Structures are given as C-alpha cells and as structure tokens.
Amino acid sequence: MAEKKEKEIKNRKEVAVKIEGQAWDDAIEKAFLKRQKDVVVDGYRKGKVPRDMYEKKFGKESLFFDAADMVLQDAFTKVMMENKDLVPVVQPKVDLKSLDEKGVEFTFTIVTTPEVKVNKYKGLNVKRETPVVTDEEVAHELGHLTERYAEFVVSDDKAKLTDVAVIDFEGFKDGVAFNGGKGENYSLELGSNTFIPGFEEQVVGMAKGEEKEINVTFPEEYPSEELKGQPVVFKVKVNEIKVKQERELDKEFFEDLGMEGIDTKEKLEEEIKNNIFANKDMESENKYLDDLFKAISEHTEVEIPEEMIEDELDRMISRFKQQLEMQKISIETYYQFTQSSEEALRNQMKEEANNHVLYRLMLEEIAKLEKVEISEAEVETEVEELATKYQMKKEEFLKEFGGSDMVKYDLEMRKLIAILKEANK
C-alpha cells in the first residue's frame, strides 16, 4: 500500500509517498532477480544462487536501493494521477526520506507556475530607434570586403606586418624538440596573432632565405602541462614573403565575389548598405523588445522560484557548450583559457536567466488577459510552411521543433508581441 501526505509552500508542493507491504516485497524480489543474474556464490553456478543464500552473504539491505529505483517512477506517477491540478514547471526534486525492509518513503518537491500579476502593459510609450546607415560605414565595409578578397604576391622585400611569411620552423625546450612544434612551408600572416605572443614580431624584418632563432615563452594558460609558462627556442627559416595586394573593383573581382546582379561599385555599395541596414534593423528590433519587456516587468509582481532560474541556467549552459563545440572548443578548454569555472559562468548568466523566466511568465499572463488564441488550422499552416522552408517532412520538422504545441506557443507569442507593440506606440 502507499501512504501520502502533502505540505504546500506557496507554489511548491511537497508530496510524501511511502511504498510498503506487498508492493515493496515485490520490488525487493525484482531487485534480487536482477542481482541474481551476475552474482557468484561458492557452491552455486552463476545466476543460480537462492535468495536466502544471497541475503546471508550480502545482506537483505543490499537490495533496498535497487528496489527503491524500481518503484520511484510508479510512485511519481501515482502522485501525478492523484494531484492532477499539479503541473510541474521544472523537473521535480525527489528526496529519499527512509529506506528499510518495511518500505521506502520518497518526498517529491513539485514546483508549479507562480502567481503573476501584471499591473500595466499598455501605454508605456516605448520607442523604437530608426536605423541609419552612413557613407562612412559603407566605405568601411567595402574596405573589409576588398581586403578579404585581396591577393598575395611574392615580394623580395623584408617581412613586415600584414605580409605572409612562408616559413619552416621547429621548437626546442632545453635543447630538445617538443611534439607539435614543427612545420614546413607554413603560411603565417604577420600580425594575425596566430602563434605564441612575441613570435610573429620577431619574424618581422627577416628576408627570404634568412634563418633565425626566436626566443618566446608559452603562456601560463597554455593547455600543455609540459609547455605552459616555459621558455622555448624556435629555429625559423623564411622561404618566401608575400605582400597583400588590394583588388581593383573590376570585372574579375565581381566574378570572384559571386553576388548575383552585382557588377559595379555602385551596385555593391547599395548591397552593402542594405545588409548593414538589415543588421541594424534587427538589432534595433531586439533592443526595442528588450526595452518593452523591461518596462512591462517594472509593473509586474511575481516571486520566481529559484528552481526555475536554475533550470533556465542549465539550458543556457547547455546551449553555450553546443556553440563552443561547433567551434571545436570544449567547455573545459574554455574554462582553462578564461580562468573560469561553471560556477563563475552560472553567476555571470544568472541575471539573464532570471529575465528569461520573468519575461516568459509575464508574457504568458498577458496572453491570458488578452485571450490570445491560435487555431489548429493556423498551427497546421505554420508547420507546412516551415517544413517546406527547411526542406523537411512534417513529422521530421515537428520532432526537431518539439511538437505542434511548441509551434502553437511560438505563434501565440508572436501574436501577443504584435499586440504589445501596437499598444505601446
């Protein structure tokens, strides 16, 4: 049988469940059958030891934790079935209160949506900045573009910053070559800070065919334990020097650029101007929405449970790790190079996480006040359009997006934001 007691604290509910009697006996028997497959006891074949002999050798209590694991999900399901008004907003916390041969008692702490009171969300007079693109910005970006497509031509002059030096090099620590410190015909752009601090500066002034010993010290945060903070010597030979030569805005340049319909300087400048405007417009929209949400939040009353903020932080850290992995950087390497830790990163992100949760709760409450509704037909149309856009089957898209409920929620928020923008001009 299962006994249950409840204690409510604001939007948290603690539900204690005790599994005992036949249900607990059955769980212990299942735990034994699971252990029996692998256990070895003298005088018995593997998997054939009787339960009384198992308990004599290992003790009955050795089965209790496995049995508790086996009934945990059933216990939580029972809690949810008998408390259908409870809708957890984060993964419920479970504590093991007691465990013995008579039974097991769990306490589930279930956090539900806190009460939200939005006192004002209209007539806040939040303004959106109109983006402006200057001629200087266009010229600056055009310079970046021509530099990106610049060509390197062989030079007989001595190497200087921005040149590319094609070098052979080998590193030595205490006169012994170290792993990873050798390269041949390596193209090094001087001033790019690709190599150890101080290395590129010492290549400046070298001529083709010149050989030189370069003394540098590895940074203290360098990932190799053997080399970090250590002085080393690189033997360097310059094989070739290439000088960056800016491109003319001619037919060949526009062909290399590969932008459809762009074949003159004027058209390219117009395209650059449009791109800068689009980026500024997006930044302006994001800032406007952030300002709008912040203004509404100042008129909002809510006590956010710490569990919701921690849950949001978990998501943010996970996304951050994925972004690093896309750049082939591990989170451990990030912590090492920034002399940081997960605790420091969580503290750094905590205010943003709090705002994410606050704004989400606030918008969901306003959506109720405004009676924002999305029809199944609207959801279906959105799914079909997005699946087509991303060249995916509907089922595949829904799986990736998180289901039709997520599509519906996204549409609700977009409709609500349009209402809020109109109400706060």
Image: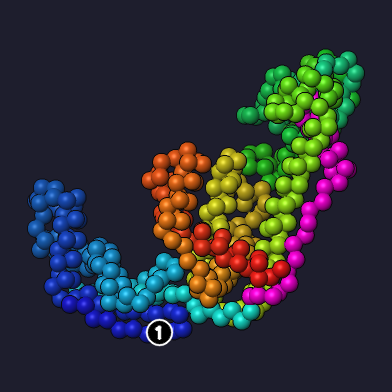
Q: Which residue is mark 1?
A: 8
In depth, the one of 369 and 339 nearer the eye is 369
Q: Residues within 10 Å of mark 1 (few under 14, many from 20)?
A: few
In depth, the one of 179 and 418 nearer the eye is 418
**x and y percentages locating residue 138 in the rendered image:** 83, 40
Residue at image position (55%, 50%) is 321
> Where is residue 249, by image quadrant?
top right
**x and y percentages locating residue 92 in the rendered image:** 40, 70
Compared to 83, does 230 lie above or below? above
Say whether residue 95 is left or right of residue 127. Answer: left
Say whether residue 49 is left or right of residue 299. Answer: left
Residue at image position (88%, 42%) is 135
Q: Amino acid at mark 1?
A: Glu
In depth, the one of 181 and 79 nearer the eye is 79
Residue 68 in view, yes or no:
no
Magenta stretch containing residue 117, yes or no? no
Say whether residue 97 is left or right of residue 421. Answer: left
Compared to 55, does 208 lie above or below? above
**Which stretch appears magenta?**
121-150
